[in-house]
Image (cartoon, helix red, strand yellow):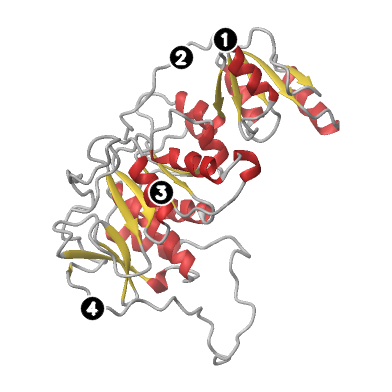
Amino acid sequence: MGSGQVTERLDWNGKNVTVAGLGVSGIPAARALSALGARVTVVNDGDDERSRAQAAALEAEGITVRLGDGDTLPTGTELIVTARLAPRQALFTAAAEAGVEVWGDVELAWRLRGPGAAPWLAVTGTNGKTTTVRMLASILEAAGLRTAAVGNIGVSLLDAVLGAEEYDVLAVELSSYQLHWAPSVRAHSAAVLNLAPDHLDWHGSMEAYAADKGRIYEGNRVACVYNTADKVTEDLVREADVEEGCRAIGFTLGTPGPSELGVVEGLLVDRAFVENRRENAQELAEVADVQPPAPHNIANALAAAALARAFGVDAKAVRDGLKAFRPDPHRIERVEEVGESPTSTTPRPPTPTRRKPRWRPTTRSSGSPAASPRARPSTSSSRSPRGGCAGPS
């Protein structure tokens, strides 16, 4: 199941590539590039015992490693690959002056995809990324799709792209660092969960941080998913340059409007990927199917469901995937009961909206949805001048 957006394959043979930094991303990138025939030099600020051991292993494979100087641009460098180093590093200043391009490890993985590569469903945000991506992977698995949670979580993107295992779709967690250095990534659909000041020392300002997060929407094909309670995420959708027909899909803890997913009477419902979404809705799951049913986790589940529905997953798989998902230990755990019956062991879900909906629910998620979940892209005129996602219709 290809993405339809495989980038032009590069000839790496003899290309001089500098990898900036040893670490969980730098070492796999160096090895992958060396295996492709590139002449790889790794530069690293540190020169401690661990770094020397890592350097010795790479040098045994024919990779040059320079320790103690991560700022000087190696002579002849044609490309720099980095992971989390800040753009203000002296190495990148020297690269800009020399006209040398800088890619992140995510950009490298995107460029190394082959024909028929699995499309990416991508997630970023200040909080909730890992949980949402794991929920999404669980839903995709429940739909019978070959998938993995990758990126800033679980399997590395390079391993997923270059490994022998084949995937139908990837659930991808992307950090602001990774997005900064990934100008060519084009997801099938993507979500920004929320935005709050974070990593400002790295990005330089809140505006730069938000702009890097917003890169996840660039070139989206089917859906840009945003949080209706966080206007900045919606603004990023409006500013994104996407493919014609891409839709803006909101998620809310209240009653959803057209082109939104939300909560009504203890149910997670979809008014985005159904026919006649001004009149109809599709039940996806119960609030109690999400564990723990805390408000922020319900929001995570709605975002994951929106991305899955954008990919064509049916309502039953959404419910089955959410019911099967369990967060990592200590994410949220019940410590003590206060003011409740000592026999109560079930966390209380968020209070659902009680406003009577003005639309008709379709079949329950245990049955067939009234319409194909892969909704036809909107052609609404509410697109931004830059070609942002289409609004409700």
Q: Residue furthest right?
A: 49
The quadrant in which the N terminus is found is top left
Whole-angstrom CA distance, mark 3 to mark 4, is: 28 Å
Query: Which residue is disc 2 drawn over?
Result: 10
User: Looking at the picture, how far across and down is residue 135, in whole percent?
Assistant: 45, 56
Asked if the residues shown at circle 4 and circle 1 are in contact, with their CB atoms under 8 angstroms apart, the answer is no
Q: Are marks 2 and 1 in contact (CB under 8 Å)?
A: yes
| First of labels 2, 1 by sequence position | 2
Q: Earlier in the sequence, mark 3 or mark 2?
A: 2
- SS state under label 1: loop
Q: Classify 10 Å Cα crowding around label 3: few (below 14), some (14-19), many (20 and above).
A: many
Dot 2 surroundings within 10 Å: few (below 14), some, or many (20 or more)?
few
- Mark 1 or mark 3: which is in front? 3
Mark 2 belongs to which amino acid? Leu
Say which residue label 1 marks.
Answer: 15
Three-letter code, disc 4: Lys
Q: Earlier in the sequence, mark 4 or mark 2?
A: 2
Residue drawn at x 50%, y 28% is 107
Could you say which disc has been placed on residue 191 in the image? 3
Q: Is residue 361 left or right of residue 71?
A: left
Give how far apart the Cα atoms at labels 4 and 2 are: 56 Å
**x, y percentage for residue 45?**
77, 27
Image location (x, y in percent) of residue 158: 53, 31
Disc 4 from disc 1: Cα separation: 63 Å
